[in-house]
């Protein structure tokens, strides 16, 4: 079942994950620097518009506080880290790690912990007092075997439907859809007016859409059950939800899918598409790079069927075992966990702070509403599939393979069977 904000620990952080061995060969409790700490290489996928501005703001603050350290921004382009993760895996296997790397909080980090690629950062949490500064449930969610291996910078929301109010008005649509069935009705109307109902991007955005169709059709409890084995992927309700997904895709521009999430959103901006399902990093892009005003130039609602639910993900940074500049890397992690760093980064990135003591006055328009909803104890919290919270890398990889086939052949039964078998093989 889904949980309140303080129950985030159940977002796929099952006993299997907690039982992973703490075999980080380079972990220690003193955190001293080693070698030349006059530079730091930070690896991330924040290189696109709407992302890099937030990172650059945090880098500027880091550099101001640490003027003797050269910052090497080792960014790799590709939404959701699809390309960066491949490059990073090669480097880690070759024992050539950066000083710190970005990872989604949740099960995405499990394999790196098991392989001994990352240091235990519990000492840093204790030194900086972070256990009291991050929500209790979030700390529990990223604790593995009693240890902490990453520092969360933000909280993102996946289940959002972005739109241009002018496009809906021109099409005679009074409001965004509240259910996926209503979306399909609107989509037929939009098609008759030569407007694409839904813009889409590469494979990860198609998975991002999938998780939110499933969430809207199944509800928070059943959606969560998909990831812990309590809901059968081949059950009638799940099959019906997957069928809805294929119908939604049928009203998208899948055949001419955009290269990444930003150009997919551009179609909503220019009015050639009515809607786009994307996380709230879209807010940073639309108000920043596109210079649009909230509520007039763009607007957003929860994806159909998910009002009152927060489909959560979080970006975090690690300290790899064998980091060449460990002391400098620690200072970067302190920046990531600081109020200054988070309050500089998040308003530009389109996310809310992981810390509970951030300056709320810095979060306006969409972000003000997002922060209030995240901190509302009545909000139901679930975890994102596409962004590493609920499924480990092996299962996620098999879902990617099955989904790539599914979006082409729309064979619901075959996809459900493949995902169910992959769960059994990787649980």
Image (tube, grey):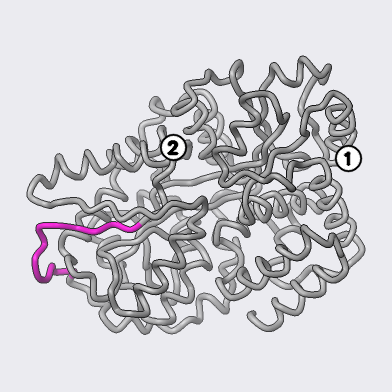
Q: Tell me: residue 1, above or below residue 195.
A: below
Can you say which quadrant of the picture contains the N terminus?
bottom right
Whether residue 171 sits left or right of residue 205 in the image: it is right
Give the structural element (helix, strand or loop) at label 1: helix
Instruction: Assess disc 2: are there few (<14), some (14-19) or many (≥20) residues with their C-alpha within 10 Å of its C-alpha.
Output: some
Residue at 89 percent across and 27 percent down: it is: 192
Residue at 68 percent across and 67 percent down: it is: 227
- The residue range painted magenta reads 31-43
The image quarter containing residue 366 is: top right
> Foreground residue, 282 or 317?
282
The image quarter containing residue 272 is: top right
Residue at 42 percent across and 72 percent down: it is: 89
Residue 188, x across and y down, in percent: 89, 33
Whether residue 390 sits left or right of residue 302 in the image: it is left
Residue 34, x across and y down, in percent: 12, 71
Badge number at residue 6: none
Magenta stretch encompasses residue 264 = no
> Foreground residue, 316 or 46?
46
Q: For mark 2, what is the residue?
A: 49
Residue at 31 percent across and 50 percent down: it is: 337
Between the C-alphas of marks 1 and 2, the distance is 33 Å
Q: Tell me: residue 29, above or below residue 42.
A: below
Can you say which quadrant of the picture contains the C terminus?
bottom right
Count of labels in the image: 2
Mark 1 or mark 2: name the one nearer the start of the chain. 2
Marks 1 & 2, CB-CB < 8 Å contact? no
Q: For mark 1, what is the residue?
A: 181
Residue 120, x across and y down, in percent: 32, 72
> Foreground residue, 201 or 275?
201
Q: Tell me: residue 129, above or below residue 360.
A: below
């Amino acid at each position: 079942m889904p949980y309140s904000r303080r129950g985030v620990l159940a977002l796929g952080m099952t006993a299997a994950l907690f039982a992973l061995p703490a075999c980080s060969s380079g972990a220690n409790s003193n955190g001293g620097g080693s070698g030349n700490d006059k530079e730091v290489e930070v690896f991330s996928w924040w290189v696109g518009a709407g992302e890099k501005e937030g990172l650059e703001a945090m880098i500027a603050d880091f550099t101001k506080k640490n003027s003797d350290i050269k910052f090497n921004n080792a960014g790799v382009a590709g939404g959701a880290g699809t390309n960066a993760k491949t490059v990073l895996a090669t480097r880690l296997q070759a024992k050539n790690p950066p000083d710190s790397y970005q990872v989604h909080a949740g099960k995405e980090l499990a394999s790196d912990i098991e392989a001994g690629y990352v240091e235990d950062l519990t000492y840093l949490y204790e030194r900086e007092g972070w256990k009291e500064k991050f929500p209790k449930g979030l700390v529990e969610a990223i604790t593995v075997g009693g240890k902490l291996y990453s520092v969360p910078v933000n909280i993102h929301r996946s289940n959002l439907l972005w739109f241009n109010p002018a496009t809906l008005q021109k099409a005679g649509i009074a409001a965004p859809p509240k259910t996926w069935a209503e979306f399909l009705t609107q989509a037929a109307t939009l098609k008759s007016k030569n407007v694409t109902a839904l813009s889409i991007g590469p494979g990860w955005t198609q998975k991002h859409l999938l998780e939110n169709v499933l969430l809207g059709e199944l509800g928070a409890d059943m959606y969560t059950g998909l990831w812990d084995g309590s809901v059968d992927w081949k059950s009638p309700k799940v099959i019906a939800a997957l069928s809805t997904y294929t119908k939604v895709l049928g009203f998208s521009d899948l055949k001419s899918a955009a290269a990444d999430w930003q150009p997919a959103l551009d179609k909503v901006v220019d009015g050639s598409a009515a809607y786009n399902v994307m996380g709230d990093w879209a807010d940073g892009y639309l108000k920043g790079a596109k210079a649009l005003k909230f509520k007039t130039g763009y607007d957003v609602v929860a994806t159909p069927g998910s009002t009152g639910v927060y489909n959560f993900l979080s970006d975090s940074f690690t300290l790899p075992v064998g980091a060449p500049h460990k002391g400098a890397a620690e200072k970067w992690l302190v920046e990531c966990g600081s109020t200054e760093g988070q309050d500089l980064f998040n308003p530009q990135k389109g996310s809310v702070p992981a810390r509970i003591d951030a300056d709320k006055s810095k979060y306006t328009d969409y972000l003000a509403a997002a922060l209030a909803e995240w901190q509302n104890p009545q909000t139901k919290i679930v975890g994102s599939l596409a962004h590493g919270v609920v499924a480990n890398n092996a299962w996620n990889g098999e879902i990617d393979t099955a989904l790539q086939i599914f979006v082409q052949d729309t064979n619901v039964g075959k996809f459900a069977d493949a995902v169910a078998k992959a769960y059994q093989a990787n649980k």
